[in-house]
Structures are given as C-alpha cells and as structure tokens.
Amino acid sequence: MKVSEIAEKLELSYGSGKESPDKDAEGCYIGDLLSLAMAKVDVGNVWITIQTNINVVAVASLKEAACVIVVDGFEIDEAVKAKADAEEVIILETPLSAYETAIRLMSLGI
C-alpha cells in the first residue's frame, strides 16, 4: 500500500514529505528509542513514534522507512520539516495513540 493511501485512509496530516515520491509501505515498527529503531526498522516499514527531533529524519532515511508517523498529537518543528523534505522522508502526524494507529494500520493490511 502506498503511503498516500495510508495518510488518506487514516486521516493523517503531512508534517513533511507531501511532495516526496510516494513510497510503498510494508510492515510496521513502533518505538521511541532511536538506537532500537536503527536496529529494527526494515526497508519499507512504517515507523510509529512520538520522537520529533531531527535524528528521526536521519534514522528513517538510513533505514529507508516508507514513512514516520508521529502520534499522540506531537508535531515536528520547521527545522525537522526542512531536513525531512530535503531527504524525502515522509513524516505524518496524528492525534491518535501509537496503539490506535497500529490497530488501524493492521486493518489496512500493514
């Protein structure tokens, strides 16, 4: 499933990457510890986190994540947005919890 489809079906807002190439998403990783995300996020995964710092962009880019979904109403700041756009990292935002987001992703087959 394409990230744009996930964003539309789950009513997620784009924090960054709206103009980035649409990526295929397969699988999911949930976690806030960047070192664990570096070890566990697979290529094409959706990464669910509350982290909003610039290092999220580095990890998502390095691991070739399909997108990052920032949950619980957290939002990225302008510096993170600019870096994510430059790196073509899609960051989506939602007021939903990580649990609610994961359940909805699972219902989409992710």
Image (cartoon, grey):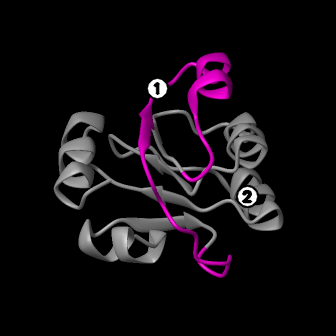
Mark 2 belongs to which amino acid?
Answer: Ala
* Residue 87 quadrant: bottom right
Q: Does residue 73 appear left or right of residue 67 in this picture?
A: left
The residue drawn where x is 34% and y is 54% is 94
Dominant SS of magenta comes to loop
- The residue labelled by disc 1 is 31
Residue 54 at x, y percent in the picture = 74, 40
Considering depth in this image, is 98 or 36 the residue closer to the camera? 36
Q: Does the magenta stretch include residue 29?
A: yes
- The residue labelled by disc 2 is 84
Residue 59 at x, y percent in the picture = 72, 37
Q: Say above or below: 20 vs 26.
A: below
Element carrying mark 1: loop
Element carrying mark 2: helix
- Magenta residues span 18-44
Mark 1 belongs to which amino acid?
Answer: Gly
Residue 91 at x, y percent in the picture = 56, 57
